Image: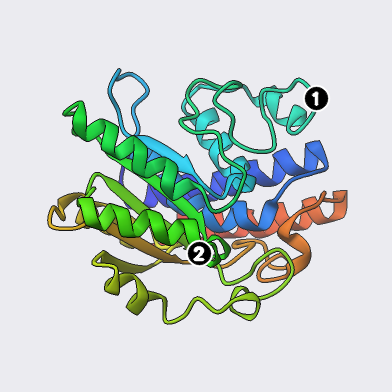
Amino acid sequence: MDLKKLRLLVNDNRKKIIEMIYEANVGHVGGSLSVIDVLTCIYELEISFNNKERSKVVLSKGHAVPAMYVNLYNKGIIKREDFKTFRQINSKLQGHPATISIKEVDATTGLLGQGFSLALGMGIAKRHKKDNNFVYAIAGDGEMQEGQMWEALLFAAHLNVNNVIFIIDYNKLSSSSLTNEVINIEPLIDKLKSFNLNVISIDGHNVFEIVNAINEAKLCKSKPSIIIANTVKGKGVSFMEMVGKWHSGGITNDEYLKAMSDLNEIERNIHNEL
């Protein structure tokens, strides 16, 4: 897939996130919009559900599961009519990823701060099985305030578990406050490097940088890689960007129309590029 098509798909996935949360009147929209570029690149370029042994995805920031569901929709795993059942009783589209609901979901997550450990175990298992596929573990920046995440990274470096690619969705905004006002995680790059990790810092909304970072991480064999994806919470929707209100909640009809107008404008701009 060329980069222009990939950018258009990312933008279309943003529309689907808005539609899902609008129809269900509930959901974590801000963090889903910040991580969708990274997740779309991973699912489109790295995940094949046709293979018995394949790369896996651990969405540690499980509340951003709409970004996972729209990619599973694109893969034919879920149906469009399922969107309106999101977070409803007995729906397979639960509010966090659940392996019991959808077998193509690779890890049940939701308790923040545990995803890197889950992914580490999966990576070690793949290594023992001589499975050459990768595990992609995506966490929120707020999760880096929890000790278990750092323990997992220490252990990954100690054992050189280089088939796990760790990714931080660094959107700078937690549920109600700026991430670094809650607990400051800076200087993040220096801290991660001191753990003997290959640190790659990118614009998490630039598909060219995302694809290159993934390829660089896959090629690095001397140490595990971690990608810091610098993002904007609520990216693509003007009135949602970096506004704490949009961590979670429903979307009104007027808000839906405005959000779709913003995203349609982005689509037109992509099409009009030389």
Q: Residue 161: percent from the left, percent from the top?
A: 24, 48
For residue 215, side relative to residue 46 (left or right): left
Residue at 42%, 62% in the rendered image: 150
For residue 108, side relative to residue 87 (left or right): left
Q: Residue 194: percent from the left, percent from the top?
A: 28, 74
- Secondary structure found at label 1: loop
The picture quadrant where one finds residue 56 is top left
Q: Residue 139: percent from the left, percent from the top?
A: 49, 54
Q: Is residue 19 above or below residue 241?
A: above
Q: Is residue 28 above or below residue 90?
A: below
Q: Are marks 2 and 1 in contact (CB under 8 Å)?
A: no
- Residue, disc 2: 144
On residue 171, the disc is: none
- Residue, disc 1: 89
The picture quadrant where one finds residue 90 is top right
For residue 50, side relative to residue 219 (left or right): right
For residue 160, side relative to residue 34 (left or right): left
Label 1 sits on what residue type?
Ile
Label 2 sits on what residue type?
Met
| Mark 2 vs mark 1, CA separation in Å | 31 Å
Comes first in the chain, label 2 or label 1 = 1
Kindly tell me whether residue 224 is visible in this rendering.
Answer: no
Q: Residue 101: percent from the left, percent from the top?
A: 61, 21
User: Quick one: quadrant of the N terminus?
Assistant: top left
How many marks overall? 2
Q: Is residue 239 above or below residue 109?
A: below
Q: Nearer the viewer, residue 204 or 253?
A: 204
Residue at 38%, 52% in the rendered image: 4
